[in-house]
Amino acid sequence: MQTLTGLTLQDIEEITDTLGASKFRARQIHNWVYLKSASNIDQMTDLSAAFREELKQVAQVTDVKIAQKQESTDGTIKYLVEFADGGCVETVLMRFDNRANLTACVSSQIGCAVGCSFCATGKQGFVRNLTYKEIIEQVLVIQRDTGLKVTNVVFMGQGEPLLNLDNVLRAMEIFSQSFRIGARRLTVSTAGIIGGINELAARKMQSTLAVSLHAPNHAVRAQIMEIENKYNMADLKSALQNYTGQTGRRVTIEYLLIKGINDSTDAALELAHYIKDIKCNVNLIPYNSVDDRYEKPSGNAVMRFKSVLEQSGKKVTVRLERGADIDAACGQLRGRAGAAGVDTRQCGEQGSTILRGRLG
Ligand code: SAH
Ligand code: SF4
């Protein structure tokens, strides 16, 4: 039994060829999967009943389940998506004021090996990479459930996308070709995996690259992000300059503001100096509390930091907190029991065991 999600038009043509049907049928099936977000073959009403029966013998649309769903008062929806092996990840749908813009925040791995000190996913440890099909399923889960078409995808859920680059690249290709989501509406966020950044540069990717810098210098970054000891800020800067040169695209520097750690005026000045010769915008992210280790910055500190940085001539935005009442904000995705009432007992036994096993 084949699962249609993740198949390209050419892959679907192979199925229709085997069944002795025309390429036009393949196009219809393809559009039902990606654009009309069918959940099952019976919904594909422009195929004859007889052909649907034949197709059902060899294929199904999906093999994932929604294990849990939570809706925020601001319209954000968080899904706990369960894959065939019982593994689960969280996926978030964010709507902004402009309702035409529906952004899916997808996970690229179950857990994460990078282990940043402020991140809920990092605390979970690494379980496994997602396949490209599992990445695509997350967007389809949203589309099927809401009946709406996702317009933007950000790889800002669980996991480090550049440590699962092949699957992420293949998923991005399908987002562009099959979902018709333009490359510029796709954003990959990385903790700064230099090899991956160079690979994106070499491919001249037209998607957006966001980099979790989060500190104005090596010492502070090493204190909060272990990865700084492997890929330091000096090398990261060269990689970003190479990236902007090769792609012609501006990068987004993400900067998590944590009270008393990296939110001072001096830090803003030092950051301004570091990014001076990088073609970039800056997105400030007020820390979302995941435990007692760090605190949120004050509103004043955020505004002061922003205005100091703006004097350097860069465009600076502050990330709106979405879905705070359901722990759907950045860094709060854990995909496990205990997070905002998400109960992974509803996930398959195996997945729950993996997650429990990792978390003790
Ligand atoms: N692994 C990638 C993408 C997933 S994390 C990366 O690190 O970039 C998406 C964003 O959420 C990153 O910028 C990350 O640093 C940020 N984040 C992690 N924990 C957070 C927290 N507690 N509060 C706010 N943002 C957080
Ligand atoms: Fe992994 Fe990103 Fe979380 Fe760091 S912030 S632990 S890289 S998911």
Image (cartoon, rainbow, N blue to C red):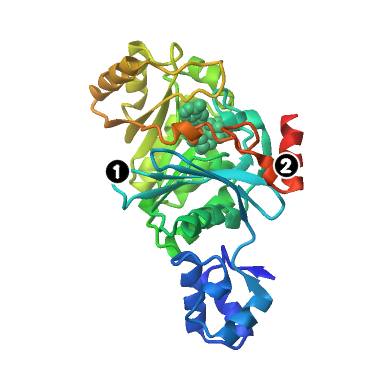
**In this image, 19 relative to 105: left or right?**
right
| Above or below 40: residue 48 | below
What is the x, y in percent for residue 72? 44, 39
Is residue 193 visible to us here? no
Q: Quadrant of residue 306?
A: top left
Asked whether, in this view, residue 84 is left or right of residue 96, the answer is: right
Q: Tag 2 or tag 1, which sits nearer the N-term?
A: 1
Q: Which labelled disc corresponds to residue 72?
A: none
Q: Closest to the observer: 211 or 49? A: 49
- Residue 63: where, in percent of width, then height? 64, 60
Q: Is residue 186 above or below residue 117?
A: below
Q: Quadrant of residue 176?
A: bottom left
Quadrant holding the C terminus: top right
Q: Residues within 10 Å of mark 2 (few under 14, many from 20)?
A: many
Q: Which residue is mark 2?
A: 352
Q: Horizontally, is 206 left or right of 54 in the view?
A: left
- Residue at image location 57% in from the left, 64% down from the top: 5
- Residue located 59% across and 78% down the image: 14
**x%, y% of residue 28?**
47, 77
| Number of on-image labels | 2
Instruction: Tell me the SS state at disc 1.
Output: loop
Give SS at disc 2. Answer: helix
Q: Is residue 341 left or right of residue 262?
A: right
Whole-percent x and y of residue 210?
Answer: 42, 38
Mark 1 highlights which residue?
Answer: 97
- What amino acid does circle 2 point to? Ser
Residue at position x 57%, y 73% in the image? 41
Q: Residue at x 69, y 55 (%)?
A: 84
Instruction: Please tell me how crowded label 1 is: few (under 14), some (14-19), or many (20+) other residues with Cα within 10 Å.
Output: few
Q: Amino acid at mark 1?
A: Asp
* Callout 1–callout 2 Cβ contact below 8 Å: no
Marks 1/2: CA distance?
A: 36 Å
